[in-house]
Image (cartoon, grey):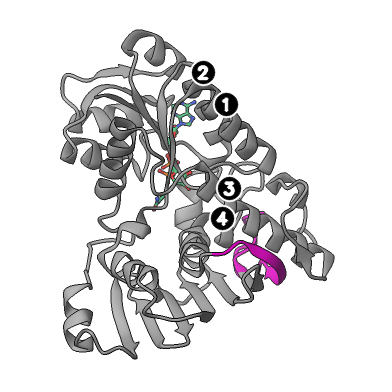
Amino acid sequence: MRYALIGCGRISPHHITAARNNNLEIVGVCDIDINKLETAATLLEHVHQYTDYKMMLEMERPELVAIATESGKHASIAMDCIRMGCHVIIEKPLALSLEDADQIIQLAKQKGVLVCVSHQNRFNKSIQYIHNAIEQGRFGKIFHGSACVFWNRNQKYYEQASWRGTWEQDGGALMNQCIHNIDLLCWLMNSEAAEVFAYTANLRHPYIEAEDLGLALVKFQNGSYGVIQGTTNVYPVNLEESLTLFGETATVKVGGKSVNEILEWKVADAQDDPENIKLKFSETPPNIYGYGHTPLYADMIDAIINKRQPLVNAEAGKRAIELILAIYQSATLGMPVKLPLLKGNTIYFKGQFENE
Ligand SMILES: NC(=O)c1ccc[n+]([C@@H]2O[C@H](COP(=O)([O-])OP(=O)(O)OC[C@H]3O[C@@H](n4cnc5c(N)ncnc54)[C@H](O)[C@@H]3O)[C@@H](O)[C@H]2O)c1
């Protein structure tokens, strides 16, 4: 399958590795920044390089394109790729507005192509095992879930790329860092968020526009509840990304730096040995991005071949951003907000923390 990559920044090596591991034919790579392009090219000998992605799409006619540019550009680039008939893997978040998310969903349907969003943690061994156990009914009703991202992002990280932490191109701790765990919470609770109440703040990063702390309470349509704590303020380095699920017949916690270690496995049916589960389904990847891009690509390729939806499709990507936009809205209004939202866009929150 002919594959091309748009955006050769920090996350791009994970896409290149995933493409290689899945035997994709890498036909083109594109970045508007020549230095980034040249760095990527050292990993990609004989692959055609472009500084204009539209030209690359014309010349190379890829069947599958990955988009790993700054978040605020995902939607317009994705729509250009979809119009050209390409399937797309879009880095998270899918888009920064609901309008753009809906347009991507509609256009992909019209063009008969698939959209996958890089919420790769769904493919962590730990998360897959938990999901299967939930599907088998082993947790009973899940009463509440708690999603925590306690990470550190310092000034150096934000200075690496001027788009980070801006409302127009990124959002803050929730939209950038915590979104993976928010996706997992929604997926594992297996319900749509119905209402949210939240606080957000910028306490430690005066040089960015968006929040560095988000605290939210979520009520799901199925009567379950969720708690979200996402921050990039943690001293001095990343502490944990964890998810704890409290079910009728199970209490399970997955943690580590990035939801890759099963820390608690208390399941009433005692079908498996908790110590064995903790060992067998825990991983220690070299960084927080984990090993998930390769299986996410494998799932998307299989979806294309077998004409089915990928596990993390555009609707799933929209669900995560809609909840975050509702959190932003609730924090701004100081009151609970009901979902689905009629509209939502990170740029509505421009200036929110200016006087703090
Ligand atoms: N899935 C994950 O775990 C994960 C981790 C990190 C980042 N991300 C996401 O990946 C995206 C990129 O993040 P990053 O940290 O790699 O950013 P980055 O700034 O390091 O890289 C983005 C690159 O895109 C390039 N670019 C911008 N506009 C372009 C265009 N029109 N055509 C071609 N290239 C263009 C930039 O020049 C830059 O090199 C973001 O949306 C981010 O949220 C996901």
Q: Quadrant of residue 305?
A: top left
The label shown at residue 83 is: 2
Q: Which residues are magenta?
A: 191-213
Q: Viewed as shown, does residue 17 lie left or right of 152? A: left
Which quarter of the figure is the N terminus placed in? top left
- Residue hosting label 1: 107
- Residue hosting label 4: 320
Element type at mark 1: helix
202 drawn magenta: yes
Residue 7, x across and y down, in percent: 40, 32
Q: How far apart, in angstroms, are the residues tagged by discs 3 and 2?
A: 20 Å
Mark 4 is on which residue type?
Ala
Determine the residue positioned at 34% across, 91% down.
268
Residue 341, x across and y down, in percent: 74, 52
Label whose residue precedes the other's in the sequence (4 or 2): 2
Q: How far apart, in angstroms, are the residues tagged by discs 3 and 4?
A: 5 Å
Q: Quadrant of residue 201?
A: bottom right
Q: Viewed as shown, does residue 254 lie left or right of 285? A: right
Mark 1 is on which residue type?
Leu
- Residue hosting label 3: 318
Mark 3 is on which residue type?
Lys
